[in-house]
Image (spheres, rainbow, N blue to C red):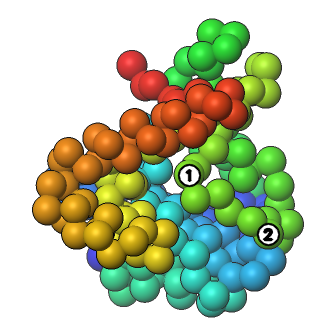
Amino acid sequence: MTLTFYISDDGRIITSPYPKNEKTRFCLAEKTSKGTLITEFDERSEVVNQIYSNSTDYEKALLEYLNANDRRAVLSGNYNGVVLNAKCRRCGSFGLKRSLDSKAPSEITDVPVIPLFVCKSCSSLHYSLTDDYLLALVDCRKELFEKDELDQIHGDLKGSVKLLQEYIIRIFASKKVSRIRIE
């Protein structure tokens, strides 16, 4: 697979859209202070996977993640961040921007497990948690779960995802962080 990489002035790489499992995806790679953060999005800009690599060669890490053998780099200084066309639950305006886009990649030291977005109008926080991302999180971050929890999740995948979503809703509701709803 050959992809086009668009490289921003601050060093972020965003890919052209590509097909994956009969869906459309795109990726963002950022060379952080400690390694590489790769975030995969669906066609609506919702996070479907996020991995952290200790590699400082973020182009190579992205190619490996995508199982791509070739890329065409295009320098493009007009990266404006990943924006969801979703309504803010607080002020009602559209356009939620990924919270990590408020920092230069080299300043990113901590990456939240649950992706956060901020309203461009009122700055209220929102979280995005797709079922795809939750399943990827369970698969790659097994240390977050007890063995019996993992057994239960794999035994009843659909029911477990629903239960995990409900737990997360309660946690974020107590912090007054709303879940993103894309209509």
Q: Quadrant of the N terminus?
A: bottom left
Q: Which residue is mark 2?
A: 109
Please give left or right for residue 182 compared with residue 151 in the image.
Answer: right
Q: Secondary structure at mark 1?
A: loop
Q: Quadrant of residue 17?
A: bottom left
Q: Residue 52: which disc?
A: none
The residue that appears at 39% across and 71% down in the rendered structure is 146
Query: Which residue does the image show at 49% across and 34% down from the upper left?
Result: 169
* Above or below, comparing residue 98 to residue 12 in the picture: above
Q: Is residue 94 above or below residue 28?
A: above
Which mark sits nearer the N-terminus, 2 or 1? 2
Q: Quadrant of the C terminus?
A: top left
- Image position of 155 (left or right of 139): left
- Of all residues, the one furthest to the top in this rendering is 92
Give the residue at x 56% y 52%: 114
Residue 118 at x, y percent in the picture: 70, 34
Left/right of residue 83 with respect to residue 128 in the rendered view: right
Direction from residue 123 to residue 70 in the image, left or right: left
Toward the viewer: 56 or 134?
Answer: 134
Callout 2 secondary element: loop
Question: Residue placed farthest to the front in the image?
Answer: 148
* Nearest to the observer: residue 161 or residue 179: 161
Q: Position of residue 57 (x, y in %)?
A: 64, 88
Tally the marks: 2
> What residue is pinned by disc 1?
114
List x then y, in percent, for residue 60: 54, 87
Q: Which is more foreground, mark 2 or mark 1?
A: 1
Q: What amino acid is at disc 2?
A: Thr
Instruction: Compute the Cα span from label 2 to label 1.
Output: 15 Å
Work out whether residue 98 can be spotted.
yes
Task: Write the residue at 57% across / 39% down.
Answer: 171
Q: Give whichever of 80, 115 is nearer the camera.
A: 115
